[in-house]
Amino acid sequence: EFRRVLFRSPPESIQAPYGITKRKAAMVATSEIRKRGLALPGPYKTTVAKSMLTPSVGPDIDVFFVSLLSGGGRTSRQLYQVAVNHISGRVEFVFDFLAGTMK
C-alpha cells in the first residue's frame, strides 16, 4: 500500500528569490553531520535561522544557521550548529557543542 505524502512549499517570507530554502539548508546540515561521522540521537530537532557571517576579509556571507538539538523544551540541548551558505548551499562551518570545536 502506498501513502501519498504532500510537501508544501515554504511560506513566501522564507523562500529566497535565489539560493536555497530553510528546508534545504536543514537537509544539507543533517547530511553534513552524518558525513562527518558525528553522533545524532534517535529523536532530534532542527531549527533554522537566517543570518549573516562577517569575515575579517571579504564581503558578508548570507547564511542559514541550522541548530541540531536533542531533547525538547527546557531539557533540549544544542549539539551542533551548521552554517549553510544561503546562495550556494555550501557548508561554511560546523560547530560541535559536545567537543567544543569548529571546523
Image (spheres, rainbow, N blue to C red):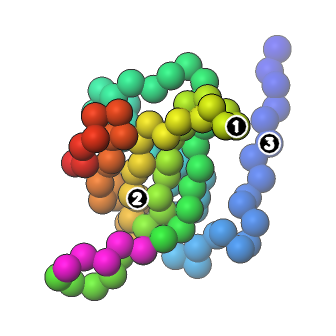
Residue at x 72% of width, y 60% of height = 10
Q: Secondary structure at mark 3?
A: loop
Q: Which mark is residue 73?
A: 1
> Residue 91: x, y in percent?
33, 55
Left or right: 52 as drawn, with respect to 44: left
- Pointer 2 local density, CA inside 10 Å: few below 14, some 14–19, many at least 20: many
Quadrant of res 98: top left
Q: CA distance from mark 3 to mark 1?
A: 28 Å
Say which label, 2 or 1, has the lower sequence index. Answer: 1
The residue mark sitting in front, 2 or 3, is 2
Q: Is residue 55 visible?
A: yes
The magenta segment: 52-56
Give the amino acid at mark 1. Answer: Gly
* x, y percent for residue 82: 40, 51
Q: Can you name the residue that lies furthest to the left here?
A: 57
- Which mark is on residue 2? none
Q: Position of residue 40 (x, y in %)?
A: 45, 26
Number of residues whose C-alpha sits closer than 10 Å to that of mark 3, classed few (under 14), some (14–19) or many (20 or more): few
Describe the element under mark 2 as helix, strand or loop.
Answer: strand
Q: CA distance from mark 2 to mark 3?
A: 26 Å
Quadrant in the picture for residue 13: bottom right
> Sequence-wise, which precedes: disc 2 or disc 3?
3
Quadrant of the image occupied by residue 71? top right
Q: Report the magenta stretch's main SS.
A: loop
Q: Which of the labelled discs sits on residue 6, or is there none?
A: 3
User: At 33% across and 47% down in the image, what residue appears?
Assistant: 95
**Residue pointed to by mark 2:** 84
Q: Amino acid at mark 2?
A: Val
